Image (spheres, rainbow, N blue to C red):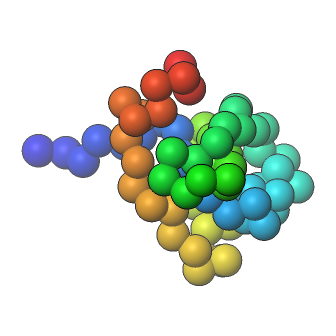
Amino acid sequence: MQAKIEKFIVIHSRQVAQEIIDAGQALIKMEPSRHRRGKLVFIFERSHLIDEILTRSSRRPQPQHLSEIKSAY
């Protein structure tokens, strides 16, 4: 069985999201966090660029299935 590759990635850190945007990746959507009141999450389309930035920043996104992001698409 192959692992399912998610089309979108949810970033919880504003600093990492800004780094991704500065590198040229388009932000798909920004919405309130469902797990941390008063915080935002940043939704991007998954790409190699994002994987590189996350590897460099040593921050790992928390796994979140697209079905949990009801308003994303």
Indicate the position of residue 40 as horizontal and vertical percent values.
68, 49
Q: Would you say 60 lies left or right of 32 here?
A: left
Observer-nearest of 55 and 36? 36
- Residue at 64 percent across and 48 percent down: it is 41
Q: Choose top left, top right, bottom left or bottom right for residue 54.
A: bottom right
Q: Is residue 49 visible from the viewing direction of this image?
A: no
Q: Choose top left, top right, bottom left or bottom right for residue 63.
A: bottom left
- Residue at 37 percent across and 30 percent down: it is 67
Q: Is residue 55 visible from the viewing direction of this image?
A: yes
Q: Classify the position of the N terminus by image quarter.
A: top left
Q: Choose top left, top right, bottom left or bottom right for residue 55.
A: bottom right
Observer-nearest of 12 and 36? 36
- Residue at 88 percent across and 55 percent down: it is 22
Indicate the position of residue 53 as horizontal and vertical percent values.
68, 66
Observer-nearest of 3 and 14? 14
Q: Would you say 38 lies left or right of 34 here?
A: right
Above-or-below relation of 71 to 41:
above
Instruction: Work out which residue is located at the far front of the displayed protein and give it.
Output: 37
Instruction: Work out which residue is located at the far top of the displayed protein and give it.
Output: 73
Indicate the position of residue 13 as horizontal and vertical percent values.
68, 63
